[in-house]
Image (spheres, grey):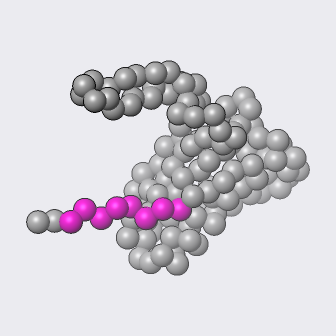
Amino acid sequence: MKYVVLIHSNPQPWGHPTIDFTDAGRAVPPERRAADGAAFDAFLADLSARGELVAAEALAAPESATVLRGSLDGDPVATDGPYAEAAEHLAGFFLVDVASPERAREVADHFAGPGDTIELRPAYVWAQG
């Protein structure tokens, strides 16, 4: 079962890891941030060793986005900037392939850091036929 772990955040300035660039993240004592970072690195290594990590990417700042909107004449209309004004933007994602919804939730729990909102969503299964 494939799931996408979407990380929503609003680092100022935009940067990764987001904990280093959010007010909530900067409030975490440096020793704890270092320990949490090491634990997260070990978690990612385990996820990869289990064959559950399919793909992952951190995303550039929302201002670097190009938004394409469909139009009635068939030509998409392109504009610069983020899709919408929002308190949080999509900062990155992880695609995982796990055995159950419970395992997906267990994995997603590791991504819920200070200053971030995590969205766990099953990947859509296309019907064959």
| Position in image of residue 76 (x %, y %) | 32, 26
Residue at the location (48% across, 76% down)?
A: 101
Above or below residue 3? Residue 81 is above
> In this view of the protein, can residue 3 be seen by the observer?
yes
| Position in image of residue 105 (x %, y %) | 56, 71
Q: Quadrant of residue 90?
A: top right
Magenta span has 121?
yes
Of 73 and 56, the residue lying toward us: 73
Q: Which residues, given as a range, are shown in magenta?
A: 120-127
Residue at the location (76% across, 53% down)?
A: 114
Taking the image as shown, residue 50 lies to the left or right of residue 92, namely: left
| Position in image of residue 86 (x %, y %) | 65, 38
Q: Quadrant of residue 127?
A: bottom left
The quarter of the image holding the N terminus is bottom left
The quarter of the image holding the C terminus is bottom left
Taking the image as shown, residue 25 lies to the left or right of residue 119, namely: right
Q: Residue furthest left?
A: 129
Residue at the location (57% across, 34% down)?
A: 84
Residue at the location (40% across, 56% down)?
A: 54
Taking the image as shown, residue 97 lies to the left or right of residue 84, namely: left
Above or below residue 97? Residue 20 is above
> In this view of the protein, can residue 42 be seen by the observer?
no
Prevailing SS of the magenta stretch = loop
